[in-house]
Amino acid sequence: MPTCPTLAGGLRLAVCAAALAAVATPSFAESFYLKEQSVRGAGRAYSGETADTGVSSLWWNPASIARSGREVYVGLHGILLDSDVDNAGSSIVYPGGTVVPVNGPVGSNHNGDPIESGIVPNFAFAMPIGDRFAVGISVAAPYNFTTKYQPGSFTRYDALTSELRSGNVGLTAALRVNDWLDIGAGLDIQYVEATLTSSLPNLSPLLPDGRSTLQGDGVDYGWNAGVQAHKGPWDLGLSYRSAIEHELDGDVNISGLLGPIAAGNVSTGGTATFSTPWFASASVRYAVNDRLTLNGQVNRVGWSEFDAIRVRYGAGGDTIVQDYKDTTGGSVGFDYVVNERVTARGGIAYDPTPTQAGERTGRIPDGDRMLYSGGLSIKATDSVTVDTALTYIALDDSDIAVDRTFYAGTAADTTSRLRGRASGQGIAASIGARWAF
């Protein structure tokens, strides 16, 4: 929790740390990661992606383009969400120990659809150089969502608006080692920007709330590597995508604090560092016959990299613990060639949440989820294939619980106790095209 040694200078650090505490965390996917990176993959719930070939699997394995030829992929995923976040006894403890429920006429006990629907684009291009070497470039938005609560929501001391935008440019090289083995590696250039707002309590429930706003952005770098083996009816794939340590430079604005804590009102610059997770994937594809291929994939995600957000402000700093846990999920699916023009797909996936009970904030009303997918690929011409997919996302109900202390270490020490219940579901409709030329 934010701490400060004095009510004046240290108070500013504590307030700014609270405003930065949930940077890069809003999403209806696996915490703040969006899985929608391939339309063809969406049709089979992203099973077999690490082992499949072609430019639309480039996000999952850089080795996928070693034998794909010259190819372009574009995709668009529209995600329609239905979510609810309800109060379950939130309160605030004012100086002197006075406990007041956070609800009633100044609050909202129910928030309908706080997680906004959105669109996720993808692009990738691959080109062979000689008989065994290929290069590629991809553009993706792996972290890209918005969460908004009503102005008087019971979540307001933790979260009001959370907007996250990202863009990832990947540069890839792949090598066809022999007739069955491919390898690849890539560089990720990742841009992240965030806008976060929340309310700040004054020292009496009779006073209006203050407000905090953070806007920041930054560019940082990571890498990925992978290998594929193709032998008879079997395709096997392994890949790894590194964690990326992000540093956001931004502006922090605090206003509306009254009386003894008015010294906390400030407009200044600051930085926050945090890490996105690493990803390790293993998948297999087995061609039962000329028409039917079965797929399976296991994903291990290093969410423990997102252990804390480290804030720097002036000569001081603070650490806000997140305590995410690593997760293991997976999917199974199939591809079925209906005729020479049409391929049907289907799949089921399980994605566990990395958030832990007792530490789940209003910015991440996250729970375990199941994905149920179906899709079609239609060969429109000899060189152009159109991919479509539809995915139903079932999110388990989850408890929101987090205590946040403001102005800690001073006589103004105030603690909000957020308690809520989140539920939701969603539909992802995807369309894309692959052009071989």
Image (spheres, helix red, strand yellow):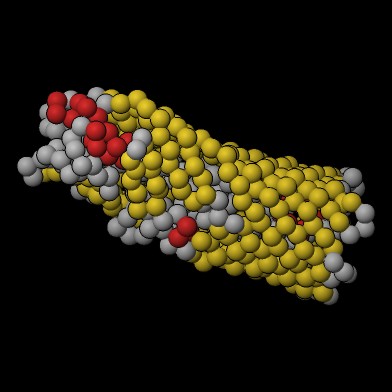
The picture quadrant where one finds residue 283 is bottom right
User: Horizontal placement of 372 versus 87: left or right?
Assistant: right
Q: Which residue is rendered at x = 71% and y = 45% of the image?
A: 138
Residue 82 place in picture, x, y as percent: 45, 44
In this view of the protein, which residue sits in the foreground, 393 or 340? 393
Q: Which residue is rendered at x = 24% and y = 24% of the image?
A: 256
Residue 206 place in picture, x, y as percent: 12, 28
The picture quadrant where one finds residue 148 is top left
In this view of the protein, which residue sits in the foreground, 354 or 322? 322
For residue 295, say whether it is visible.
no
Q: Is residue 315 above or below residue 326?
A: above
Residue 15 place in picture, x, y as percent: 28, 36
User: Horizontal placement of 153 versus 44: left or right?
Assistant: left
Q: Is residue 194 above or below residue 257?
A: below
If the image is split into quadrants, where does the C terminus sit?
Answer: top right
User: Horizontal placement of 428 versus 109: left or right?
Assistant: right
Which residue extends farthest front? 315
Q: Which residue is rendered at x = 81% and y = 50% of the image?
A: 135
In this view of the protein, which residue sits in the foreground, 8 or 123? 8
In this view of the protein, which residue sits in the foreground, 400 or 17? 17
